[in-house]
Every structure is written in structure tokens, then in C-alpha cells.
Amino acid sequence: MVSHLAAAGYRKMHRGKAKSSMKRKYKGFTLMELLVVIAIIAVLVAIAIPMLASQLEKSREATDLANVRSAYAQVSAAAMLGDTTATVTVDLKQREADWQSVDPVNIGGIVHSRGDDDTDNWIGIATPGGSCVVSYKESCGVVLTWSGSAAPSKPSYPFDTSVNDYFSPLLYATNFWKSPAFAGNSNFELDSRCQNSDYIPSIKAELTKMNNSLLQQGDCTWAFLGDGRKGQSSKRYLFWTSLNTDKVGAGKKIPVLIQTGDGKYYVSETTTGLRTDKKRVPYVAISERLITNQSTDQYKQVLDAGTKYLTLEDAYDAYIAALNNEKYDEVRGSSGQ
């Protein structure tokens, strides 16, 4: 009897402890405990995000270096086979100027440290959204031309870089733009070398209102071309070259900087073309006649053959790098550059 009572008492006591334990087990966190946990997580996130961003930038820079080294190998191989005109443009993925993960940078034996001046083989610095043009010169070998200036805090250009739209304040401001001759024209051409044009004087009159713009540089040649119809701004183009095409002559390949009517920039190549104005005076246009119809869009072909840039400055830097390629030595010389 005593044994049974003792066993019953033990079971009752054990059930009581179990209930008490279960009550403690399901007890929730206090507000203070939750706030402490949230604070710890916030600190960990604050530490982790910069580290993650740094690792992502390192990854992007590693990709850029691999791509530029591959381009270096391509240009070097082409030069060894006798082709010294080969050029490869690498679009950069990095989001910070210069190199953050490696210093100095070594590409095919071309070594450059942060803060170094330009050399014969290394021109400029890497920039976010920029590019590296890999070319070859017989005098010094492979040349790496980066889209950024070697002194980014003091960019220097021969023209006013704040003037970067040549459609709204220039072409569209002329008195002829909205005339039927252009409103229904799907392929117009207005070349600055056309002496007896009915339209170029109006553009040049508007151009005098600008101060030291790209189109006012030296003996340059420019042309507005494309589709004049309503809603076709992306199919209008400004072609520009620092070369005097009349001096260069017809049938010559030249580098060109291009701005589209919707604000995009490209550097590509055209072949100069012979024209005759209304008074039968010959001149050399910036490009051979380009055709656009349902089956062919030669303007797009020119853009696709070139490289796209985010800003006018980047496009100009790339243009100068292209112009200095040895394959343009003849046209540079004939134009006096």
C-alpha cells in the first residue's frame, strides 16, 4: 500500500514538473531580447555589405583584366603575322575609376601603377562604363588606351564639354527643319563641306550662338543625316571628324564620332564620298551615301561596326585613340594633323 502511494506521488510530482517545463519551453522572447537580436543583425549587415561590394568590384576588375589581356594577345598575334592595324576594344565592367584590387597592373609586360603618368604603351585610366582600346604601333608595340584621363580631377578637352546636344539647340532650331522638305524626308543629308547648300548656312548661324563646341573645332567636318519624319529621332545622326574631308579625298576610310538623335554616342568608321552641289561644285562628304529601306539600314551597320559610349567625353577620347592608329596615318597627314 505504501509502495503504491509512493509511486502515485512520484508520478504526480513528475507530471507537475513536466507541465512546468513545458510552460517554460513555450515561453516567447521579450521585446528587449528581440531588439538586441535586431541590433546584432544590423551590425553584421553593415559590416558585410561593404565587404560584399568590395568582392564584387574585385570580380569585375578581374574580368576586365582577363578581357584586356585576351585583346592584347589578339593584337600581338595579328602584329606577328604582319597585320599592324588590328584594334580590339574592350568594354569595361568595373564601377570605380582606376584599379582597386591590384597595383601595379601588369598586362603583357606593360606595367602601370596608380598615379603614374601616361607612357607610350599606357594612355589614360580605367573608368566606370569606359573602355580599353588595344592597338599596335611599330614604334613601341601594343598600346592600351583607356577611356579615362590620366588626371581625372582636371579633364582637358579642346571644346566645351557642357555642350553635348547638337540636335535640339542646333538642327531643330533652324528655320527649315519643320518644312515639308524634311518632315517627309526619310533619308536627308546635310554635310558641312557642301559650299552651296540651302541649309548649311542656317545651321552655321545657329552654331555661332554656341561657345567653342565640338563642331567649331579647327578644320573639322560634320554632317546631319537620317530620317526627318516625325517620331524618328533615334534614326537621325550627327557624324563628326576632326579631318578636313576635302583634303583627305574621296574613297578614304576615316574614324568618325557619332551622336544619335536620342543621345547615344558611338565611334566608328566611314568611307568618304564624292558629291556635287547644286552649282556643280564638287566636295567630299564625311561618308558615302548610306541607304535605309525595308531591307537595308546602312546607318545601323555603321553603328554596329563601332563602339558605343556613355558620354561625349568618352566618345571623343576613343575617337582620338582611333585616329592615332597607324592605319589612319595617310588621312591624318593629308588633313594636316
Image (cartoon, rainbow, N blue to C red):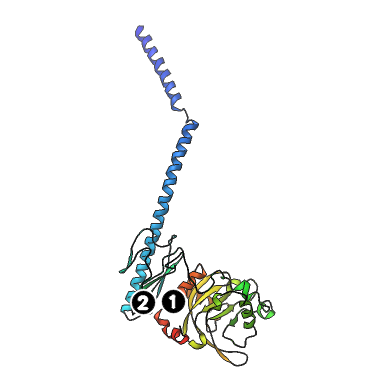
Residue 136's disc number: 2
Q: Where is residue 305 in the image (x, y as percent from the top left)?
A: 47, 75
**Residue annotated with mark 1:** 322
Is residue 185 rendered to the left or right of residue 93?
right
Residue sitting at the far top: 1
Q: Evaluate whether residue 297 shows in this view.
A: no
User: Residue 2 is drawn in which quadrant?
Assistant: top left
* Of the pair 231 and 263, the residue shown nearer to us: 263
SS state under label 1: helix
Tell me what residue is drawn at x 44 percent, y 64 percent: 127
Q: Evaluate whether residue 42 shows in this view.
A: yes
Q: Where is residue 327 in the image (x, y as percent from the top left)?
A: 41, 82
Q: Where is residue 11 in the image (x, y as percent from the top left)?
A: 39, 16
Q: Compared with residue 23, is residue 109 higher up or lower down, i.e. above or below?
A: below
Tell me what residue is drawn at x 36 percent, y 10 percent: 6
Residue type at numbered disc 2: Tyr
Residue type at numbered disc 1: Ala
Tell me the CA gap for discs 2 and 1: 11 Å
Please state, as top left, top right, bottom left or bottom right, where the N terminus lies in the image.
top left
Is residue 141 rendered to the left or right of residue 206?
left
User: Mark 2 or mark 1, which has the lower sequence index?
Assistant: 2
Q: Compared with residue 89, is residue 54 higher up or lower down, i.e. above or below?
A: above
SS state under label 2: strand
Q: How crowded is mark 1: few (under 14 residues within 10 Å), some or many (20 or more)?
A: many
Tell me what residue is drawn at x 33 percent, y 71 percent: 73
Residue sitting at the far front: 154
Q: Are marks 2 and 1 in contact (CB under 8 Å)?
A: no
Residue 148's disc number: none
User: Looking at the image, how many numbered discs can be counted on the residues?
Assistant: 2
User: Residue 177 is drawn in which quadrant?
Assistant: bottom right
Q: Compared with residue 129, is residue 4 higher up or lower down, i.e. above or below?
A: above
Q: Where is residue 192 in the image (x, y as percent from the top left)?
A: 57, 83
